[in-house]
Every structure is written in structure tokens, then in C-alpha cells.
Amino acid sequence: MKITTCRFHVSATRPQDFPRDGRPQIAFMGRSNVGKSSLLNRLLGARGLARTSKDPGRTRAINFFSVNERLYFVDLPGYGYARVPDVVREQWRGIVDAYVAEPGCPDLAIHLVDSRHEPTDADRDLDAWLDGLGVRCLTVLTKIDKLSGNEKSRVLREAARRAGGHAPLAVSASTGDGIPALWRVIDEVCESETLRAAAGDGPGARAVIQGGRTIP
Ligand code: GDP
């Protein structure tokens, strides 16, 4: 997809704030520091845009970016700070729960995992939770440029084993590696959601996407 316009849309702290205009919504989630802002900026070619999400007051909100006035990138607050008070963790669950409870939200959840680290319990919990809700989900390994060729092969093999044999996506916001492949998956989801909306159907049956393949 060629990006023509991209703008910050809204910082939602309550379900009333979520956009409900039927445009496809692609959500990004992962532990703090996983490289989410860098990846969003790289995908959008808009340096500093996703930093908006780090402004105080917006860090516990869901931030929506309108892309080409056609779809939304949805920046979910990071999780996994070891020492956050329970009340903050509850707030995260509260707003994110409310979001995924919306019909068809998101159309695709992109779960970011740092390629240098094993998935944590929080990562596994997130996968199981999304799976239980039937949310269409894609795991993407970040900062792949930090690995040597051998390490990269090993990490990709292990991630594929965890994902049941499907090739995972690996990206680098620094070098741009894997960005076109990730855009292809996003494009595919947007096309299918747009066609479904044009046909007057409701949100599609939720499915799992792994390594760019949709498994109905
Ligand atoms: P966020 O907290 O998930 O939004 O993470 P950031 O995008 O702020 O990135 C956290 C740190 O990782 C920053 O120092 C980034 O410069 C670095 N970083 C993010 N993506 C990459 C990447 O693809 N390659 C490398 N080498 N560093 C990255």
C-alpha cells in the first residue's frame, strides 16, 4: 500500500471514543520497548508520529492513526512492566478488553515479540487470550537486524515450531527488513474486510494468520 496520508486520529480512553466507521483496524501490541513505535513509524514512513502515543496521558490509552483515510493503525498500550502496580495492569486490561469486545475489533492483531528474547509468560497469556476471543492474530519478531545470520535462522525455526510450523514474520525497523512482507499481510486483510463491507456483511469470521497465511 502506498501511504498518501497518515494522521493521528484519536486517543481513546473510553469505548465511546473508538472509531466505528467500518474501516479496517490493524492493532499493534507487545511489551514495552519491543520496538512498537519504531515499527509503526517505519511502516508509515512518518518518523515521530507514533511517539504521540508516548505522551503522558496517552500511554494508557488506545491511539488510532488514520492511514490513507481508509484504515486505522491501532496502537495498544504496552504491557509487561514487571513492577507496574496492579491498578495500572487492570486499567490496561479494562480498555483493551473493551476494545476487543467490539464486533470485528481488531481486524488483525499484530503481536510484537523481540527476536532476541524468548516469549514471556505475558506474551503467552496474550496469545492465549486473543486466541480464546477468536481474534485474528499475527506474531511478528522485531529488531531482527540485531541477530547474526545463524541466530536469525535458529530464532525463526523456534518461532515456527511454536506457531505450529508456519513461517513467522521477522522485521527490522532499522533496516526495513521484512517491512514489505508485513505490508502484504496488512493489505490482504484490508482488501478482504473492504470487500466484506461492500457486500454488506458484518465483521468477518475471526481467523488466525501466521507468516502471512490466513487459516480460517
Ligand atoms: P516501544 O516502547 O515498543 O514503542 O519501543 P521503541 O520503538 O521506542 O524502541 C525501543 C528501543 O529499541 C529504542 O531504543 C529503539 O531505537 C530500538 N529499536 C526499535 N526497533 C529497532 C530495530 O528494528 N532495530 C534496532 N536495532 N533497534 C530497534
Image: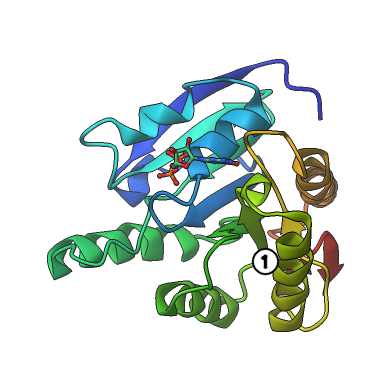
Which of the two residues, 45 or 4, is positioned nearer the viewer here? Answer: 45
Residue 67 locus on image (x, y percent) = 64, 27
Q: How is the image coloured?
A: rainbow
Identify which residue is drawn at 76% across, 46% down: 182
- Residue 130 in percent (x, y) is at 54, 73
Q: Amino acid at mark 1?
A: Arg
Q: Relative to the observer, which residue lies in front, 212 or 33?
A: 33
Residue 191 occupies which quadrant of the picture? top right
Asked if residue 62 lies left or right of residue 87, the reply is right
Quadrant containing the N terminus in the rendered view: top right
Q: Residue at x 55, y 82 (%)?
A: 132
Q: Is residue 207 visible?
A: no
Q: Taking 216 as reference, is 122 left or right? A: left
Residue 45 as seen in the image, left or right of residue 216: left
Q: Position of residue 52 (x, y in %)?
A: 38, 27
Q: Residue at x 52, y 66 (%)?
A: 117
Residue at the spot of label 1 = 136
Note whether 159 is above or below 30 in the view shown: below
Kindly tell me whether mark 1's CB lies below 8 Å from ligand 1. no
Q: Is residue 156 left or right of residue 139?
A: right
Q: Label 1: state its secondary structure.
A: loop
Q: Residues within 10 Å of mark 1 (few under 14, many from 20)?
A: many
Residue depicted at 59% across the width and 39% down the height: 39
* Quadrant where the image shows the C terminus: bottom right
The answer to whether one can see residue 172 in this image is yes
> In the rendered view, would you say 96 is above or below 33?
below
Q: Residue 114 location in percent, x, y?
A: 54, 58
Looking at the rendered structure, the number of numbered marks drawn on it comes to 1
